[in-house]
Image (cartoon, helix red, strand yellow):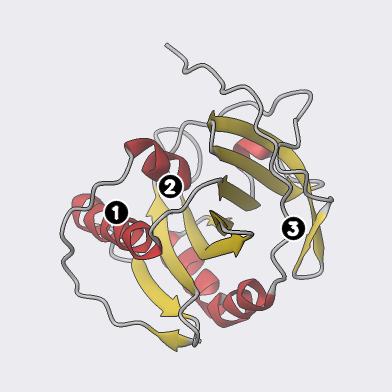
Amino acid sequence: MKNKILLSAFSLFAFTSAFHSQETKTEETAVSAPVEVVDRLNIAGPLTFHDNEYILTWSKQNSPTWAQQQYILRDDDFNNYKELINISYFDKEIDMDTAVKQKVEYVEKRKERTQDKYSFVSVTESPDGKEIIVDYLVTIVPKEGESYAEYNIDRFKSFEAGGKKSFLIFSYSKRLAGDLKYASKSLSKERSRLMEAVITLAIPPVTYKPTAVEAKKK
């Protein structure tokens, strides 16, 4: 893959706030994993990534055309995970460049807003231009609990079959708690290895059958 050069400042793009908030896992309020999880994407599990198995722990039907599922290691804690895989599937066409620019803009604005001196974001494009990866690191200082660094890799991929277009984002997140300088440095050392694992991963086939959209919490 080759690096795709992007301007440091981006124009605002019209994209749903719901998409952005769901794709941005950082600093979200923890939620309890449901007792029974619906496999809305009909993905054969458990998922295998980098020689580890991840089990389906949470899923949500965000809209009639957008379903989301999350996976963690068997012995991990969903509310305080060390590693997480998020798959967001859109049963419609979505402009990849718009989605990527919005994510980069979010990370850059967050870095400036929080004065996160360890944060970075990078964009990588496949040689054929059909996939783009955004990888970024942020550090979190929660109101309660230990501070941690979080490294994320988002792989954006468009599909077309039988004239039908769809869009998928495969995201991998790894957290390391403790001293932020040490945690950020340790995760950065793993960057090349994890990037290669995400780039070479065969995206699991999806058979999408929409379920009822979950009501928003008041």
Q: Is residue 121 above or below residue 162?
A: below
Answer with mark 1 or mark 3, whichever residue precedes in sequence.
1
Residue denoted by label 3:
205
**Drawn side of residue 116 relative to residue 209, left or right:** left
Answer with mark 2 or mark 1, whichever residue precedes in sequence.
2
Q: Looking at the image, which residue sits at the far top?
A: 218
Residue denoted by label 1:
106
Q: Is residue 181 above or below residue 3?
A: above
**Drawn side of residue 131 relative to residue 11, left or right:** right
Residue found 56% across the figure and 21% down from its top: 214
- Marks 1,3: beta carbons within 8 A: no
Residue denoted by label 2:
24
Question: What's the distance in space between the residues labelled 2 and 1, CA to CA?
Answer: 9 Å
Question: What's the distance in space between the residues labelled 3 and 2, CA to CA?
Answer: 23 Å
Percent of width and height locating residue 45 = 84, 50
Question: What's the distance in space between the residues labelled 1 and 3, CA to CA?
Answer: 29 Å
**Drawn side of residue 66 relative to residue 119, left or right:** right
Question: Where, by quadrant of the figure, is residue 172 drawn?
Answer: bottom right
